[in-house]
Image (tube, coloured by chain):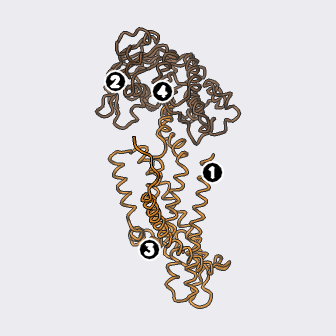
Amino acid sequence: MNTRPAKPQETIFVTTPESIPERGTLSPPTAPGTGDQTAGYAAPSEAPNGLGVELQDLHAHYGQQHAVRGVSLTFASNKVTAIIGPSGCGKSTLLRCINRMHEEIAGATATGRVLLDGRDVYEQGLDVVSVRRAIGMVFQKPNPFPTMSIFDNVAAGLRLTGTKGVDLRERVERSLVGAGLWDEVKDRLGSAGAGLSGGQQQRLCIARTIAVEPDVILMDEPCSALDPIATLRIEELIDVLKARYTIVIVTHNMQQAGRVADSTAFMLSGELIEVGPTSQIFTKPDDDRTEQYVSGRFG
Amino acid sequence: MSELVPISPRRRRTDLIMRGIFAAGTMLALVPLGFIIYYLLRRGLGAWSWHFFTSDPTGRFLGDPGGIKSAIIGTILIVVLATAIAVPLGIGVALYLVEYGKRGRLANIVRYFIDVMTGVPSIVFGLFIYIVLILSGGFGGFAAWKGSVALSLLMLPVVTRSSEVVLELVPNGLREAGLALGSPRWRLIGRVILPTALPGLVTGSLLAVARAAGETAPLLFTAFAVNATTFNIGQQMNSLPIQIFNDVRQAQDRIVDRAWGGALTLVVMILLATLVARLISRRSHSA
């Protein structure tokens, strides 16, 4: 689907591909000598930092429809970047291009470059599975696996990626603690994940995402299905998570962007209008359209 | 502003008439079912006895005609083998259609042929196996396993179609969640898609089993019939539909009664299998 010319590697964050740290290494479809599809991703259990992401001239199409029009944007490591804009402006599509979930939709294509710590995730021959392991995603609607218990939901990522040699109990506990859910569920890890409240389900999904220890977490309107109190808890969680992960959050809620994001990008009709520190975007943006949007005069 | 008025006598009358028509239609549809159950119980229960279930047909026209033990065992063996062939294959085809082929050209061609297969009369499958596996001479004569193959061909489109519908019902959010975690598609299918769809897959497969268990025509040319109980699927084997088919054509009342008893047995067996599957699917759902 994503037919892209194999361009020579440009140097963005790091000088050579060799200097990419082992964490977040993207593996070719079959790692040499193993045959395991996920073998190329070696995640140490104590990961210190997230990795930066840079988009270069990213275009996304749904068939003939041009949803993202040449966006270039940098997501700094260990920062929260919010993407705001009216419905249909292409912000969710942009997000889905970063971990190549966009191409799961029939007829959807993307061109341009998405550099994870300098390495293009669209590079030819790269294993898309390793891209998605390195870049986790939390969806709009909480989607715990309905046949699995709370424990199994958190462990699902490790099992689905075939990760061996991990102490499941320890990792599940640490992920649930990390997602701020441990105290609420520690006595009923065996009960169904779908039996939790909406806010708890979303934190369960965050626990599931961080259990595989990605470098980047993408959040697609993670609070839009939640009540204000559950929303607040997720926002507090995001603030904690950025110590270890790079976070990109798409949101319809401008107050939310103001509360959680270090920088904010404003999109309109598939184009990036403006990006900058959140306080600047909300108080004195450079572009009139941004000003109009954040002040609620359209959108 | 529109005015709120009490219900008019005309509206009330129309409602009453329409209710009456639909209720009458429903009753009409239930009449044949009621008669079938009534006659099955009346004539079938009379034939039932301990002896009926524990002895093979004697084949004698006079005296004790024997029971239907070999037919019950034969039906179970033939249908179990047919299920073992058709269910994995049918679910496999459905998985291909939903998870891999999607709306592609090949997938649509497969869908078309599955639809055509659904419409093929069962006797054609029997004839097909008769020609390919018996007349061709390479595989010996009549054998139970050939009957199973004929039945599995009959079951295949039913299993595939029902499984496809059930797999389509698995929310796309679950697929996305798994893929976004970095799961290869085959693991996603094994750990998320199949467990989520399991109750529906069981129900669909059981529909196919129920349909196959009562089929006579595919067995007539393939497994044929013997009186004695056998567990050898390489030989001819008795089955309930064939037993009923043979018995009902006899002149002796006692043998015709055996056909009724066999028919009731077959219905009860299918009913039990359906109940068991319901229980299984309910338990897996609540877990």
Chain coloured orange: B
Chain A shown in which color?
brown
Look at the numbered disc 2 and give the secondary structure of its residue: loop
> Which residue does the numbered mark 1 point to in the structure image?
B283
Look at the numbered disc 3 and give the secondary structure of its residue: loop
Residue B59 image-quadrant placement: bottom right
Are circles 1 and 2 on residues that touch, CB within 8 Å?
Answer: no
Q: Nearer the viewer, residue A41 or B88?
A: B88
Same-subunit check for callouts 1 and 4:
no
Question: x and y percent of residue A56 in the render?
Answer: 36, 18
Look at the numbered disc 1 and give the secondary structure of its residue: helix
Question: x and y percent of residue A163 in the render?
Answer: 56, 32
Q: Is residue B42 visible?
A: yes
Residue B140 sits above or below residue B83 on the image? below
Circle 4 or circle 3, nearest the eye: 4
> Which residue does the numbered mark 3 point to in the structure image?
B221
Are circles 4 and 3 on residues that touch, CB within 8 Å?
Answer: no
Q: Amino acid at mark 3?
A: Phe
Same-subunit check for callouts 4 and 2:
yes
Cα gap from disc 1 to disc 2, whole angstroms: 48 Å
Residue A270, numbered label: 2
Residue A283 sits above or below residue A177 on the image? above
Q: Amino acid at mark 1?
A: Arg
Are circles 1 and 4 on residues that touch, CB within 8 Å?
Answer: no
Question: x and y percent of residue B53 in the render?
Answer: 64, 76
Residue B94 sits above or below residue B268 on the image? above
